[in-house]
Image (cartoon, rainbow, N blue to C red):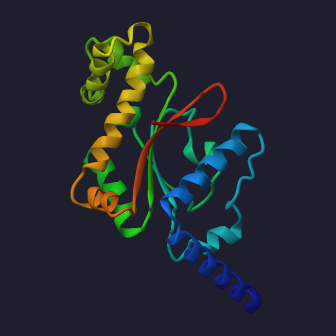
Amino acid sequence: MTIALIASVIIIMASASEEESSITPELALQKLMEGNLRYAEGNASHPHQSPERRAELISGQHPFAVILGCSDSRIPPELIFDQGLGDVFVIRTAGEVVDNASLASIEYAVEHLGVPLVMVLGHDSCGAVTAAVQGGEAEGHLGSLMDFIRPAVEQAREAGEGSDLLNGSIDNNVFNIVEALKSSQPVLSEKVEAGELMILGARYRLDSGLVEILE
């Protein structure tokens, strides 16, 4: 590598690190939603996938958002938000179920990497939530998933969701996870109270490719 190329890489790394370390929760959300719109419209730019980007990331990472999403193969966060290497810190479990390992991963991103935004991303036709709605015996370790999601299903039933029980359960599951993360002590709750961290829920639409913020 020539001296000129090394210098240019160092400059790029410094500017990228400064930009990503100072990003606000609102700007992080804006970047995600703009990327999703590009993807949904078929105009994805596929950023940060070059050899130069790999060189920038050798010394460390500065993701601007945490995505806690489902393991469903139709919903890869880097693709649907049109992001690249080092942009998003991703945790994926079936039904977005949170265990100690996934919670610790989120805390690491927030506390040590300075990530200002956590998005809990549900999606249409979630298989894990569908199984919880249908009930019955769950084999192997699947029972732990059902136990986690079941309160969301009961909330939807009590609200009289009826024929829309699945969709109500999907959204309730996201809302429950968001609230649990916001109140998780000491790391996440303190960051939220200080205004340094935004935690919100969203839902991915399989037909349009769009992500909708849940409120």
Left or right for 215, reference 15: left
Residue 62 spot, x, y in % from top left: 51, 68
Q: How many marks?
A: 0
Quarter of the image where one finds residue 116: bottom left
Residue at horizontal 34 percent and vertical 57 percent from the top:
192
Q: Residue at x 30, y 57 (%)?
A: 188
Q: Position of residue 61 (x, y in %)?
A: 51, 69
Image quadrant containing the N terminus: bottom right
The residue at the point 32 percent across, 16 percent down is: 159
Residue that lies at the very extreme toward the left in this rendered image: 185
Q: Is residue 36 above or below residue 11?
A: above
**Where is residue 127 drawn, in percent x and y?**
44, 22
Give how far across and how far down residue 55 sits, in percent.
63, 74
Residue 101 higher or lower than 131, as above or below:
below
At 38% across and 13% down in the image, what residue appears?
161
Q: Is residue 61 left or right of residue 45?
A: left
Q: Give above or below for 202 relative to 91.
A: above
> Where, by quadrant of the figure, is residue 129 drawn?
top left
> Closer to the camera, 5 or 205?
205
Q: Is residue 171 left or right of residue 29?
A: left
Q: Quadrant of the C terminus?
A: top left
Q: Residue furthest top?
A: 163
